[in-house]
Image (cartoon, rainbow, N blue to C red):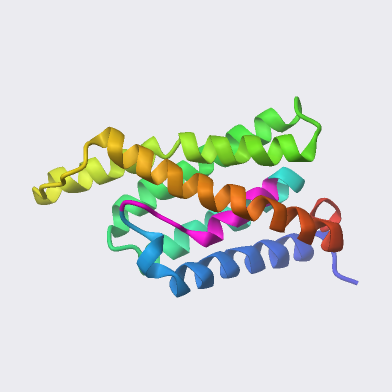
Amino acid sequence: MMNQKTKFLALNGIVAALYMVITMLIQPIAFYGLQFRIPEMFNHLVVFNKKYFFGIVIGVFFANLFFSPMLWLDLIFGVGHTIICLSITILLERYIKNIWARLLLNSCVFSFMMFIIALELEVAEAMIQLENPLSFGQNWLLMAIGEFAVMAATAPIMYAVDKKVHFAKSF
């Protein structure tokens, strides 16, 4: 029988690895403007159990470290975005008991907070003096749409998987 600490490390390691591998497979649509980063579906795991926080953050860190064209900027802004959004969802979930409402909240938090990633693009553009035809607001809107599309589309999938594997009881 696996002890709790080992189980915690193993489950978070699996989440981090899945996040990283899926990001690698979809790399062309995972970065830049209109992002469809499919592994963002794992962000929903904190809706079921906040202990998945670490696996998600580590997965984002390593996906950005190995596959991002904006390496250190994505390590700061991308990982920061994930930590902030997951923390907001975890803090607010105590007030929202309905799982579907929490999944929607999580999708909205991640989508709204995409201004952090839009800011990252602004910094990158300023650093390399790149002319971008899109404004900060347009980048934010495009990224928020992509994030919401992924999060909303995968919420029912994560809900269905939870019915089989019971994420809340995994640890």
Q: Quadrant of residue 7?
A: bottom right
User: Is residue 35 within the magenta segment?
Assistant: yes
- Residue 171 visible? The answer is no
Where does residue 147 sit, x and y in percent of width and height?
A: 48, 48
Residue plotted at (75% across, 40% down) = 100
User: Is residue 44 within the magenta segment?
Assistant: yes
- Residue 145 visible? The answer is yes
Which quadrant does the C terminus fall into? bottom right
Residue plotted at (37% across, 36% down) = 115
Q: Is residue 119 left or right of residue 61?
A: left
Where does residue 101 sit, x and y in percent of width and height?
A: 72, 34
Where does residue 77 sit, x and y in percent of width and height?
A: 37, 45
Q: Is residue 105 left or right of residue 84?
A: right
Magenta segment main secondary structure: helix
Q: Which segment did they paint magenta? A: 33-46
Q: Residue furthest right?
A: 1
Residue plotted at (85% across, 57% down) = 163
Q: Is 132 in front, or is 60?
A: 132
Q: Is residue 123 left or right of residue 159?
A: left
Residue plotted at (45% across, 42% down) = 81
Residue 145 to residue 25: above or below: above
Residue 39 to residue 88: above or below: below
Which quadrant does the N terminus fall into? bottom right
Q: Quadrant of residue 104?
A: top right
Q: Residue furthest top?
A: 95
Number of numbered labels in the structure image: 0
Residue 60 to residue 105: above or below: below
